[in-house]
Image: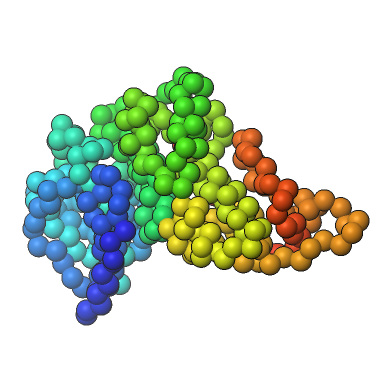
Amino acid sequence: MAAARSVGTSGATVSAWRPRVPGVVEVFHARFTEYAYPMHVHDAWTLLIVDSGAVRYDLDRHEHGTPHDTVSLLPPHVPHNGSPATPDGFRKRVLYLDGTHLGDDLIGPAVDGPDLRDPLLRRRVGQVHTALARPGDELEAESRLTFVGERLREHLRSRGPARTPLRDPVLARRLRELLDARVVEGIGLREAAGVLSAHPAHLVRVFSGAYGIAPHQYLMSRRVGRARRLLLEGRAPSEVAVATGFYDQAHLTRHFRRLVGVTPGRYRDGERPEEGAGPVAAAGVREPDHGLRTAAPSGAGRRVAFGSGRRGGRGHFTST
């Protein structure tokens, strides 16, 4: 992820960066209290959500607004402006998208109805932003963005909800094998779709349907499993992070704590159970299952046990 820029002037705070996620030209987070955008155009699609306050804007000589529960999609090459609609201004998050997910044929429908009241879409766009703000979670961001694009197309083409896709266990297994072969280096969703000759959204759906877990969650589970074995050999968390494909130690810690319940350092330095204390699993430390069979850690490493510790919540990937 490129370095973010933050600027604070006269009630304005801005953060912008370009992530390593196909289809995303720029991520833009801002809070404005007084600033009003003049009429201007973008060469990319503008996908906007407002977290506080509201924005009013003109698009194609028609006035629109963005209350808290709305997703606004402004098409490229169409002039628009923007200004606060409340005394305290507004706080927004924006994705600027190229034509990967939305083609020029959808510009007309977007001009006719740019504001979409869809709680599921609103939640999914927020999840994309959350993933984009975490270096190392590009596969998750790309997966979630695929479903955002799919739902936007449904709205703009006036279609009903997408029908449940047919099961494809062979394709799901092929993707799992591809992820298994690329645990450390990783693979982008679009690249995997090209290798397997499948649409990215279909690829995620059949994998999630077959295994009960999204591809990015599966990949992180495999990385955490490898990290556990290296930690039990006494290696430092910073070294383990690099060796298992995480962006940095903080990235390892976040996913490790979510799946195991403790930090990597505490896992490595845990006390050896006393004789007759029972299996390690009884002490609250076990391999994450997620409905998948994964290789068990080698018995050659040290065994560890922990007392009570705060267990992080499990991540979820909603594909419905």
Residue 194 visible here: yes
User: Which residue sits at x=55%, y=64%?
Assistant: 237
Percent coordinates x, y for residue 63 in the rendering: 16, 51
- Give the percent coordinates (x, y) of residue 188: 36, 42
Along the viewing direction, whichever of 216 and 145 lies nearer the viewer: 216
User: What residue is shown at x 59% (from left), y 63% (from top)?
Assistant: 235
Compared to 289, does 14 lie above or below?
below
Quick one: 47 or 89, which is closer to the camera? Answer: 47
Residue located at (9% from left, 62% from top): 38
Is 145 on the left-hand or right-hand side of 285? Answer: left
Residue sitting at x 52%, y 29%: 209
Nearest the eye: 229 or 58: 229
Q: Position of residue 127 (x, y in %)?
A: 42, 51
Q: Is residue 108 above or below residue 84?
A: above
| 196 to the left or right of 31 | right
Comparing 229 with 138, the one in front is: 229
Residue furthest right as drawn: 276
Q: Which quarter of the rendered picture does the N terminus lie within? A: bottom left
Asked where in the image residue 307 lies, by quadrant, the reply is bottom right
Can residue 123 be seen by looking at this rendering? no
